[in-house]
Image: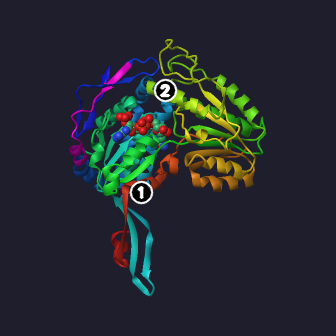
Amino acid sequence: MVRLQSYVLGAWHEGAAPFRSLIDPATEEVVAETSTSGIDYAAVMNHAREVGGPALRAMTFAERGAALKAISKALYAKREWLIEVAMANGGNTRGDAKFDVDGATGTLSYYAYLGKTLGDRTYLTDGDSEALIPGNARFHGLHIRVPKRGVAVHVNAFNFPAWGTFEKAAVALLAGVPVVSKPATATAWLAYEMTKIVVESGVLPAGAFQFIGGSCGDLLDNLTGQDILAFTGSANTAATLRAGKGPVSASTAVNIEADSLNSAVLGPDVQRGDDLYHWFINSVRLEMTQKAGQKCTAIRRVFVPEGMAEAVIEDLSEELGRIVIGDPRADGVRMGPLSDMSQLDDYREGVGQLAQEAAIVYGSPTEVEARGATPGKGAFVSPVLLHCTDPHGAEHVHAREVFGPVATVMPYDGTAGDVGALVARGGGSLVSSVATSDKKFLQALALDAAAWNGRLLLVDKKVSDTVTPHGMVLPSCVHGGPGRAGGGEELGGLRGLDLYLQRSALQGNVALLNKLFA
Ligand code: NAP
């Protein structure tokens, strides 16, 4: 069994008993244990501020980018091992594990490329200088963005230990800000193995990346106004962290990526049997079952024109019936267990709540056949499809995120206005997708739903065979969503750097401004 350590103050730290067990959710066997006792978090933050920050700021964007490239390569070289760990501690199928691990290396690589394009600069400008007073051509203003002098504290969710850790780290490090990263304890083994590879690679300066291998004690009590807290996880934890001393009293920058009731909309023009219809059914099936539905971007609400619900339920049920559930190491298994035993209760309770206003039309929250599993063992669940006939009157289907393979089919009247109002009932989502070739419908719905979604995947018949999946987060597009989804924004190419940079307006002699800073 592995005992996780934390990487702090330039050395590996092993906590003392009591240890928290990390399990293989397919067998319930303990695969690792961890304790973070004895870490001096104030010293960790100071080490980042005083050692890591200055070293990163002395590097150009191109140099920081080169470091990210080297990390990506080092991780990729151990890809098979990392996939094995993700399967053992996350319940991931091989495909799920690749999605997480490759997401991490791909995002690092993308930001490495951006670093290269930014070249020998150490900070960014924001637009050109502008005259500030009419008739005075010499007095200008120029906005610049420089790295904050604090620490990027990253708190991640259990479902993407690889991607979550390194998509955040890539952006902060490129911006020139040192990182203290904390994965969710239940699945921390993968992030620990990746940190070992990063440390062994030796490409980052001392203090640039520290890792807390479990719960983080009073780390967050040390946040100041130059620090950044980037959190991914549940809305409840987000509310607690927002109310912390740093965010409330010192204006610590906070970015929250929380949960989300994402939608998929079938346009009124799409007929059963169309290519676009098949794309839609496959997309919902994929989003329900990939990573056993434990994706913040998974489709939870499926809106179809009145009269189409029966066909969609029948075809989706057929697709879901083909998904073999079981131990990810067993032949033919396409959906593994939930990541942790504690998620089982949440899934069952959540399905029970949805079933108060929607009928279960596929699967059961209490019965599942799991290939290769020991009877009675493991966090295995069945996909559950529900049908809610009164989405305007319903509450839970728009509010309860069941973090598992669960979605609800609901009718709308065929207009963009009606389905737009239903999408908005989610209170703010990470992503919604729309399948339609009706241009007017698409435009009206997109302009309405954009206010409620961080991202919209718009699929017409010309692109249905080439688009990336609904749930796939691309580093060049923003990830995050308003309201319920946390109100945060990550990635989006260079946009993501803004969280870690301070914008400052320099006012003065135009010639000096442009010579010294532009
Ligand atoms: P969670 O229970 O809120 O935990 C998230 C993280 O917060 C974990 O690292 C956890 O550490 C830590 N944490 C909890 N309480 C804390 C406290 N008082 N102080 C400091 N850290 C604290 O969420 P989860 O169950 O891991 O993740 C599932 C949720 O994340 C879902 O709702 C999902 O939608 C959401 N999610 C959102 C996104 C997105 O990008 N929007 C992505 C993935 C997941 P421990 O594990 O050590 O307790």
Residue furthest to the top in view is 375
Q: Quadrant of residue 399?
A: top right
- Which quarter holds ligand 1? top left
Q: Is residue 312 left or right of residue 120?
A: right
Foreground mark, 2 or 1? 2
- Type of amino acid at the residue the image marks with label 2: Asp
* Front position in the image: 490 or 80: 490
Tag on residue 166? none
Please tell me how crowded label 2 is: few (under 14), some (14-19), or many (20+) other residues with Cα within 10 Å: few
Q: Secondary structure at mark 2?
A: helix
User: In the rendered structure, does residue 297 fall within the stretch colored magenta?
Assistant: no
Count of numbered labels shown in the rendering: 2
Q: Position of residue 229 (x, y in %)?
A: 36, 49
Q: CA distance from mark 2 to mark 1?
A: 39 Å
Image x and y of residue 324, in percent: 60, 20
Question: Horizontal and vertical percent for residue 281?
Answer: 68, 34
Tell me the quadrant of the picture where the N terminus can be found.
top left
Examine the rendered structure and indicate whether residue 324 appears above or below residue 491: above
Judged left or right of residue 210, residue 461 is right
User: Is the shortest distance between ligand 1 and the CB of mark 1 under 8 Å?
Assistant: no
Is residue 34 one of those drawn in magenta? yes
Tell me which amino acid carries mark 1.
Asp
Q: Which residue is mark 2?
A: 345
Density class for disc 1 (Cα within 10 Å; few <14, some 14-19, many ≥20) is some
- Magenta segment boundaries in residue numbering: 30-46
Q: Secondary structure at mark 1?
A: helix
Does the image show residue 479?
Answer: no
On the image, the x and y values in percent for residue 72 come to 40, 39
Provide the residue designation for mark 1. 498
